[in-house]
Amino acid sequence: MSRLYIIPTPVGNLDDITLRAIKVLGSLDILLAEDTRKTGMLLNHLGIKVKMMSHHLFNEHKTLQSVMERLMAGAVMGLVSDAGTPAVSDPGFLLVRECIKNNIPVECLPGATAFVPALVNSGLPADRFCFEGFLPVKKGRKTRLEGLKEETRTMIFYESPHKLLKTLGDMVEYFGADRQCCVSRELSKIHEENVRGSLQELISYYNTHTLKGEITLVVAGL
């Protein structure tokens, strides 16, 4: 019977994968991967061989029909992103929606995602929070930040290293220089770093420190 499995993969340390995920990966007809080379390294680490197809942000619209045809023909498929849980700031939503429309079972396995450890590590309130993912690069960026000025919940953002200082500067403009936050990077890796302080203090810190790795930014609410 056809089925789509959404399979979380480690955000850093390759041992952060569940036994169930390993079992499912080994049972698939086809694995859809954001980057087949990166996923191939994980599969080699786990000793798993499975046919892979590329499925990423730039081709998911084009490949959707062919993927659905395979699923409707009875294929059991899995979807992984480069790290973490697919469809959370990564490709996956379109495929899941189409499967639901066509009554193809979708099963999302629990597992790794970057924002949960970053939130807990931050020391900021974790009982209520909002996940904002990546801010728009240009169009809609100011509108998004303006809409968050009165947000009382802890806010979580993803950011790339070369854009972090700009984002921190924009947040100073809308949230104020004294707003508390935490920058987490290289989560679960040897060089994991969680830097806490005000937005202005973090700007000063990262003006003199090298930035590498994917970043999760946790910002206090109003």
Image (cartoon, grey):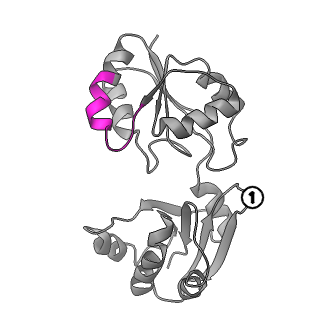
- The residue positioned 36% from the left and 16% from the top of the image is 70
The quarter of the displayed image where residue 166 is located: bottom left
The quarter of the displayed image where residue 98 is located: top left
**Mark 1: which amino acid?**
Ile
Kindly tell me whether residue 214 is visible in this rendering.
yes
Measured along the vertical axis of the image, is residue 178 above or below residue 139?
Answer: below
Closer to us: 45 or 96: 45
Name the residue tied to disc 1.
190
- The residue positioned 28% from the left and 69% from the top of the image is 138
Q: Is residue 78 left or right of residue 188?
A: left
Kindly tell me whether residue 126 is visible in this rendering.
no
Is 33 in the magenta? no
Residue numbers of the magenta segment: 54-66
Count of numbered marks: 1
Q: Where residue 82 sits: x, y (%)?
A: 52, 44
Task: Say which element carries label 1.
Answer: loop
Measured along the vertical axis of the image, is residue 35 above or below residue 192?
Answer: above
CA neighbours of label 1 inside 10 A, class few (<14), some (14 to 19), many (20+): few
Q: Where residue 174 sits: x, y (%)?
A: 39, 83
Q: Where residue 137 sits: x, y (%)?
A: 33, 67
Q: Where residue 156 sits: x, y (%)?
A: 51, 64
- The residue positioned 59% from the left and 25% from the top of the image is 25
